[in-house]
Amino acid sequence: MVRNYSLNASDGEKLQVTTFYSERIKTNKTLVFVHGFKGFKDWGFGPYIGEYFSKAGFVVVTFNFSHNGIGENPLEFLELEKFAKNTFSREVRELDEILSTVRSGFFEEIAKDCKIGICGHSRGGAISLLSSVRRNDVDAVSVWASIAYLDRYSKRQKEEWRKKGSFDVMNMRTKQIMSLDVCLLDDIEENSNGILDLKNAVRNLGRPLLIAHGDQDLAVKLEEAEELYSWSDKSKTEFFKMFGTGHTFDVVHPFAGTTPKFDKLLDKTLNFFNKHF
């Protein structure tokens, strides 16, 4: 079964949410999937993740961050003004609010006392870690191709960013120029030792963590996964290095089906959560 919801964040912004579950399986296991930068819940493998884990006995929650650039059209970046004003702190807060909604009993398909796992891809991995460390009701975390650094910009780029008032990035798939306002840079610089301290979040996570990364990832180098692992509690952390695959584990958008490498990642992630739930 698939259900779609439109939730109001604490600031009134809309969060589009989809849940996947099996009516034949009564479960107390919930998995929240967190998309990354220039990603969205219906990108490529998003719906397939929902189907895979729901068949395995999970209720799966996927959602769009309010400022990810996706609006009423679930597959097109038509809200570039919002995209420009997105921040890491906003995403941490919105994921926290999604988790609180999961725990509140709002979703009738989710048990209030359920086990909660989070799976974040790319930037979504970092957001997952930053949100999880703030809560005591997240039972395990998996990050795929996660970044280890939020500050990814050179001194020269930052100077030009402030001078121009925005920083442009190219979406290679859609060929859109997607601008980032200075508010993102302000967020990084003002909160890097607080809510956005990723090193501290990993060190103090205090629960099972799976770090999965492809050795051919050109978007986020394998070294970032190794850095995350170096910060982690080794007694609670698994490092799953995948050979011969990149940032999306050979999956493309529009979705053209799963791949052997992605199937391997899904199986590893499923076994990880089942072991700790």
Image (cartoon, grey):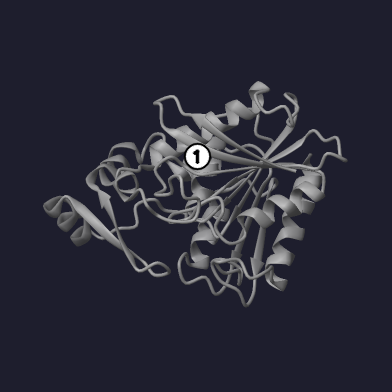
Q: Secondary structure at mark 1?
A: helix
User: Badge 1 is on which residue?
Assistant: 130
What residue is at 28 percent from the left and 37 percent from the top? 190
Q: Quadrant of the N terminus?
A: top right
Give the number of marks. 1
Q: Residue furthest front?
A: 73
Residue 99 visible in image: yes
Residue 274, above or below 261: above
What residue is at 69 percent from the left and 68 percent from the top? 258
| Quadrant position of residue 118 | top right
Q: Position of residue 165 (x, y in %)?
A: 16, 50
What residue is at 42 percent from the left and 41 percent from the top? 197
Residue 202, above or below 93: below
Amino acid type at image mark 1? Leu
Q: Which one is nearer the viewer's eye here, 86 or 247? A: 86
| Quadrant position of residue 11 | top left
Q: Residue furthest top?
A: 104
What residue is at 40 percent from the left and 55 percent from the top? 77
Q: Position of residue 83 (x, y in %)?
A: 34, 48
Q: Which one is nearer the viewer's eye here, 107 or 152? A: 107
Q: Residue furthest bottom?
A: 244
Q: Position of residue 189 (x, y in %)?
A: 28, 42
Indicate left or right for 48 with 168 as reference.
right
